[in-house]
Amino acid sequence: LAKTTQPISMDSYEGQEVNITCSHNNIATNDYITWYQQFPSQGPRFIIQGYKTKVTNEVASLFIPADRKSSTLSLPRVSLSDTAVYYCLVGVGPLGNNRLAFGKGNQVVVIP
Amino acid sequence: GAVVSQHPSWVICKSGTSVKIECRSLDFQATTMFWYRQFPKQSLMLMATSNEGSKATYEQGVEKDKFLINHASLTLSTLTVTSAHPEDSSFYICSARGSAMRTNEKLFFGSGTQLSVL
């Protein structure tokens, strides 16, 4: 089971770029890295997924170094609505494992 | 696509009663479903993993006789909290994963069920 470690909380001003790093030292060869966003009293929502190098979609970028032991979620120009808890999850993917446990997550608070 | 529907959204029950929570995959076949519980300001805690047609695999410390999981079809899994007590009050979330391309690449989550036991 790939354990993940993230910083607990961070504040950011509107319009700034926010970077959140997740450590996953024992990631397995078949594991993908997926980031989710969760608002209070809601289920997590998919943000982005990657296996290596860089992935970008309309809401975020994901940077994964060559050793894949960490990953960084980058949220460009955050707004107040980006205030949420962000989780990285390791193991999902076509051949990923089936014990998909979340780490503590990172509370991002966007300040006006 | 890949929508997971979870019901009810919230439920209040008396201590000692049983509560059933349903999790349905609406547009894909969910070969694997996961059940999580979450306390306020804490992360999601994996309770159990179930594969369609098989018995669920429970995480250490989760009582299988207390939290009954049924995954009898490829679109439905249920979690029954038996003889609920106030300490079972929590936010319960299901997620599903398919076997086909696109649906096997990530988890799709339900909207959660807030259980309050009086």
Image (cartoon, rainbow, N blue to C red):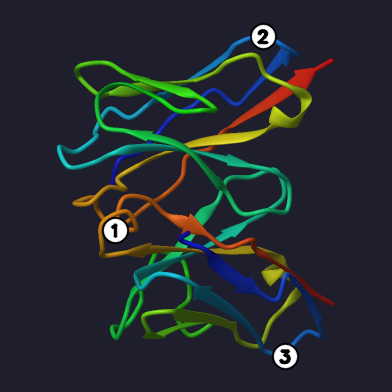
Is the residue at mark 2 from the same chain as the one at mark 3?
Answer: no
Q: CA distance from mark 1 to mark 2?
A: 36 Å
Between B2 and B78, which is closer to the camera in this rendering?
Answer: B2
Which residue in the structure is indicated by mark 2? A16
Which residue in the structure is indicated by mark 1? A98
Subunit ID for the residue under disc 1: A
Subunit ID for the residue under disc 2: A
Q: Are marks 3 and 1 in contact (CB under 8 Å)?
A: no
Between B20 and A56, which is closer to the camera in this rendering?
Answer: A56
* Relative image position of residue A56 (x, y in whole percent): 41, 23
B98 with respect to B9 (left or right): left
Closer mark to the observer between disc 3 and disc 1: 1
Residue in the image at 71% along x and 11% along y: A15
The residue type indicated by label 1 comes to Asn
The residue type indicated by label 3 comes to Thr
* Relative image position of residue B21 (x, y in whole percent): 61, 79
Q: Which mark is residue B17?
A: 3
